[in-house]
Amino acid sequence: MNTLLRIWKTKELRSSLLFVLLMLVIFRIAAHIPAPGIDAAALAQVFAKNQFLGLLNIFSGGTLQNFSIVAMGVMPYITASIIFQLLGMIVPAFEEMQKEESGKQKINQWTRWLTVPLSFIQAYSLILLLSRQGQFFTGAQSTTILFAVISMTAGTVFLMWLGELISEKNIGNGVSILILAGIVAGLPTLLSQSLAVYDKSQLVTLILFIVVVIVTVIGIVIMNEAQRNIPVQYARHIQGSRLAGGSSSHIPVRLNMGGVIPIIFAISIILFPTVLAQFFLNAKTAFLRTAATEVLQIFQNQLFYGISYFVLVFLFAYFYTAVIFHPEQVAENIQKQGGFIPGIRPGKHTADYLSFVTNRVLLLGATFLAIIAVLPLIAQQFTGSQNLVIGGTSILIIVAVVIDSVKQIEAQLTMREYDL
């Protein structure tokens, strides 16, 4: 309660929270504006029976089931971000741009531009994917598809703008908060559907679901709180006529630097082959039809899906850490400030030591995060419940995003205390 009162009494922070709530209200209003010419009632029956579409609905922010103008959510923007971050790891020119503020702004602008054609392509592919499940168009098909694609593309750009506005308030990642809002809005329906199918004979399944929820929450909290502190000593130096310095500090190396981003990236990548295969399922070329069918059969195998999910989460945890944490820059900043790590020489030796410690800590963190991610899949093998997978993924995202937002709010409170 004391923290809530401090937040409310801080004018800037209170205004930021109210602004974010307003943006989320606008997002939920847009989520109920249907795309033109779509029979939403017929779509709802398909989503209730399809696990793949259920996962896709989660990462659209719960808007896909209604097939609203924001039905694709922020998925195209996430895909564009992944592309440019991969280019930053491969192309030296992009790597140099990421080190400068002006370069980062250019990359962000290019990411926004790339989101538009990706949205158009994904909207058309999504309509084709859903049209194979049944007839959902109420008018002339070609005209309806064109208007639906244009409106959904505009909806994605609108959500991208809302996400950036939220991020500017420094109380969490805007894209993650939009996904969180969609999941929370759909949780009552998901829970009611899950509880409705359980009877006394399935009591073990219900208990297992509760256990998975508890373990997931505890695991995410542990990962977000755990860190390795690397001590840093600052040598004394003469400043004017006085002797200054001689203080000590530390560099916190978190067990999970990427938060929920590795999970979102992994799901984005693992859903892409299935969406693409659905697009070529009725192609005129026999090779494309065969390849699309085989891809769908491979990803319907729960063992292959689980292993792929585990590996992608593990790799993206390393990948995102490499994007946001640069040992060379940290070592350079420490040296410029007259600091050093005890027992380690400044410069390259410090950078190598930071890389060594980060990789060791991240090995445990990435493995832990990947295990938590596939835990609902493992539990599903004992229960056969598809809702367990969808619910577990939702809880994973909710906990990680909430913890990240709480920490950013606490950081702003602490900063303002120092200002006073």
Image (tube, grey):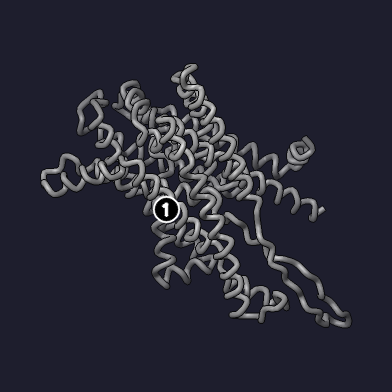
Question: Can you say whether 76 is above or below 184 in the image?
Answer: below
Graded by Cα atoms within 10 Å as few (under 14), some (14 to 19) or many (20 or more), the crowding at tag 1 reads many
**Which sits in the foreground, 264 or 97?**
264
Q: Which residue is mark 1?
A: 312
Asked whether residue 146 is in view, the answer is: no
Which residue is located at x 70 percent, y 74 percent?
A: 341
Percent coordinates x, y for residue 10 in the rendering: 75, 42
**The quadrant where residue 347 appears:** bottom right
Question: Can you say whether 245 is above or below 169 in the image?
Answer: below
Which residue is located at x 35 percent, y 41 percent?
A: 302
**The quadrant where residue 94 appears:** bottom left
**Which sits in the foreground, 255 or 117?**
255
Percent coordinates x, y for residue 62 in the rendering: 44, 33
Question: Can you say whether 251 is above or below 119 in the image?
Answer: below
Q: Secondary structure at mark 1?
A: helix
Looking at the picture, which amino acid does disc 1 mark? Leu
Which residue is located at x 54 percent, y 61 percent?
A: 324
**Which sits in the foreground, 155 or 187?**
187
